[in-house]
């Protein structure tokens, strides 16, 4: 009987140690999740699908985040919401945020997903307009004052096309689409994964985009933004959110179809599956420049940010005195390695 006592004592000690080891895991699992709102730049379309895939796969839940995804009404509106703290994070055109931040908005990007600009001039493939030189003599529908119309003169210049060699018709987003659909314009300025898909959905005709970036006119585009106060007050939450979002983008790169299906499951009215998949594949092609080809999503090269700042000063209406440095507007400190 005496020999059994040490054994019983040892078992009791091991059981106690085991309970202490298990307790933190239970406490972590039982901990309430942080409620996070991600406000998008616009109504749902292809490029938004990774966030739904990440939520469906539990990437955000695994990081202790309960994610709500809200549609937006333009990058500027979402930037205002994040600045006012009515949205935790925003997914918008980062150059729009830069212009707001240069004027004092307390905003910063914690990762740039679209490092190649989606800006394009596009029309129906049946018109056989495949290269910049094919634009000469054609009619192009534009929206005056938007980011694409600001870069349009530079696109023409680098391709040795004189402005008078192209006829311009003006209108809002829907008017541009209608102009091409009705034959009033040969082409329109739009995003490769947005307006190109809308044209194809509306007509069933294939569309050929000519990307500005392929002519060397490239700006960083969509990315995550946050209020600077959040970065200082809750850096752990930002790191967890960016870790989950990076995993979501990687999963979408591997399976654009799964990303689209996750978005349609959450919102069946988000679009037509086949064309959304085309748009998602086009979106993935914008995730990396040659500088970041071997990096994980969102980890933009500061050289690309600097080049975008130069373009904003030259063509985007940004005051040179408020230009600042890339690090003033974009940080990589919250991204996973």
Image: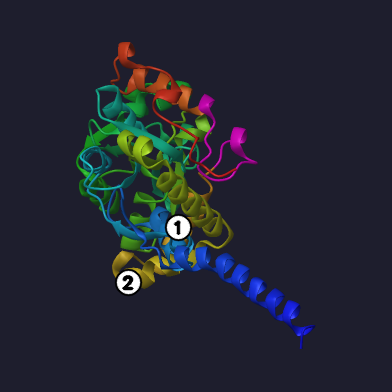
Provide the residue span drawn in magenta: 288-303
Work out whether residue 331 or residue 261 is closer to the camera in this orientation and state it: 331
Say if residue 257 shows up in the picture: no
Name the image quarter holding the C terminus: top right
Q: Secondary structure at mark 2?
A: helix
Q: Position of residue 166 (x, y in %)?
A: 33, 30
Q: Which residue is mark 2?
A: 268
Q: Position of residue 120 (x, y in %)?
A: 41, 40
The residue lying at 33 percent from left, 56 percent from top is 198
User: Would residue 88 be found to the left or right of residue 311 on screen?
Assistant: left
* Magenta highlight on residue 30: no
The residue lying at 67 percent from left, 72 percent from top is 14
Q: Secondary structure at mark 1?
A: helix
Say if residue 262 shows up in the picture: yes
Vertical order, 152 against 317 (above or below): below
Name the image quarter holding the N terminus: bottom right
Work out whether residue 237 or residue 52 is closer to the camera in this orientation and state it: 237
Q: Residue 171's image quarter?
A: top left
């Amino acid at each position: 009987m005496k020999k059994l006592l040490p054994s019983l004592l040892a078992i009791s000690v091991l059981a106690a140690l085991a309970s202490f080891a298990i307790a933190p895991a239970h406490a972590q699992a039982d901990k309430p999740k942080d409620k996070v709102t991600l406000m998008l730049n616009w109504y749902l379309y292809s490029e938004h699908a990774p966030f739904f895939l990440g939520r469906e796969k539990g990437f955000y839940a695994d990081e202790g985040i309960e994610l709500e995804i809200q549609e937006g009404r333009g990058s500027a509106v979402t930037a205002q919401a994040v600045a006012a703290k009515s949205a935790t994070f925003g997914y918008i055109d980062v150059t729009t945020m830069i212009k707001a931040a240069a004027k004092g908005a307390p905003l910063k990007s914690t990762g740039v997903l679209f490092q190649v600009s989606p800006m394009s001039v596009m029309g129906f493939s049946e018109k056989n307009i495949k290269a910049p030189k094919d634009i000469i003599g054609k009619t192009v529908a534009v929206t005056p004052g938007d980011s694409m119309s600001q870069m349009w003169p530079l696109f023409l210049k680098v391709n040795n096309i004189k402005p008078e060699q192209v006829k311009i018709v003006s209108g809002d987003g829907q008017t541009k689409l209608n102009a091409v659909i009705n034959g009033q314009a040969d082409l329109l300025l739009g995003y490769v994964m947005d307006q190109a898909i809308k044209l194809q959905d509306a007509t069933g005709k294939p569309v050929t985009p000519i990307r500005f970036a392929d002519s060397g006119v490239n700006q960083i585009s969509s990315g995550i933004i946050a209020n600077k106060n959040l970065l200082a007050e809750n850096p752990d939450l930002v790191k967890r959110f960016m870790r989950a979002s990076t995993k979501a983008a990687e999963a979408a790169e591997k399976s654009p179809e799964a990303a689209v299906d996750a978005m349609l499951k959450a919102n069946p009215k988000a679009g037509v599956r086949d064309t959304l998949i085309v748009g998602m594949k086009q979106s993935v092609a914008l995730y990396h420049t040659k500088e970041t080809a071997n990096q994980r999503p969102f980890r933009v090269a500061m050289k690309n940010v600097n080049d975008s700042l130069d373009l904003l000063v030259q063509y985007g209406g940004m005051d040179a005195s408020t230009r600042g440095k890339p690090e003033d507007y974009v940080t990589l400190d919250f991204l996973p390695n």
